[in-house]
Amino acid sequence: RLLRACEDGTKYTVQKCIDLGADINCRGKRGDTPLHLACRNHRINPNIIITLLKNNCGQNQKNYEGDTPLHLACRNHRINPNIIITLLKNNCGQNQKNYEGDTPLHLACGSYYKKPEIITSLLKNNCKPNERNNEGDTPLHLACRNYRIDPEIITMLLKNNCKPNERNNEGDTPLHLACRNYRIDPEIITMLLQNNCKPNEQNEKVNKKPVFFFNTCST
């Protein structure tokens, strides 16, 4: 019942389940705890998150995909930013990686329509901007792949010492990916160039410069 209540219930229902002795760290089919399910739900009342945390739920437990509740909150593109802040204030591991090597910051940067204040909260809480996932991507790589990314997010990453010329496992720098992304805001490419992205770096696998991908996508 507690799992169902965290998916679509009210604070009263959640508290009632806890008062009746429900296991606050019980798991569903995907290994999700009540806190995981609450963070998946973009309509969740933030007070439910607070209730679970006050009752000592395991805020850093991983589900079967290696995601913590903070991972799921950052993947949820319609979540209330205050929920991210609440999780961070309650020692949710801001640099934990899931089984794909993604940190919460990776997922936030790769998520459509992500609000800049969420990225700000993560960076202020010492999320590492240069961590690599299993594909070798940093958060900046994922942001440059995301055609719906807000240019303000790119600015925040660069101001927080995100290395602009890191290569992923395919040999791409963030500028390669931005130039390949035909729907990206051109302002982002300008921003990368103004922040020391090297325009003549060749992709190590196909020996192509960023301008090649930009011209290919433009035609």
Image: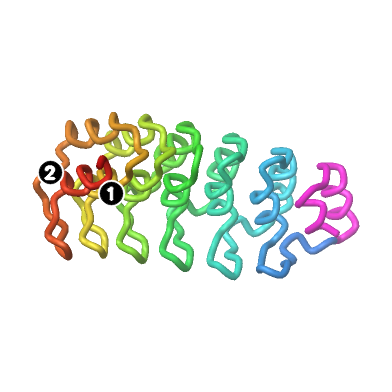
Near-viewer residue (61 or 151): 151
Residue 163 visible in this rendered orientation of the protein: no
- Amino acid under disc 1: Leu
Picture quadrant of residue 63: bottom right
Mark 2 residue element: loop
Relative depth, front residue between 189 and 165: 189
Identify residue for label 2: 198
**Majority secondary structure of magenta residues:** helix
SS class, disc 1: helix
- At a point 28% along the width and 47% down the height, the residue shown is 180
The question of residue 6 being in magenta is answered with: yes
182 falls in the magenta region: no
Depth check, mark 1 against mark 2: the one in front is 1
What is the span of residues highlighted in magenta in the rendered image? 1-21
Q: Residues within 10 Å of mark 1 (few under 14, many from 20)?
A: many
For label 2, count other residues whose C-alpha is less than 10 Å away and answer few (under 14), some (14-19) or many (20+): some
- Residue shown at 79%/64% (left/top)? 23
Q: Position of residue 98 (x, y in %)?
A: 48, 63
Quarter of the image containing the N terminus? bottom right
Q: Amino acid at mark 2?
A: Lys
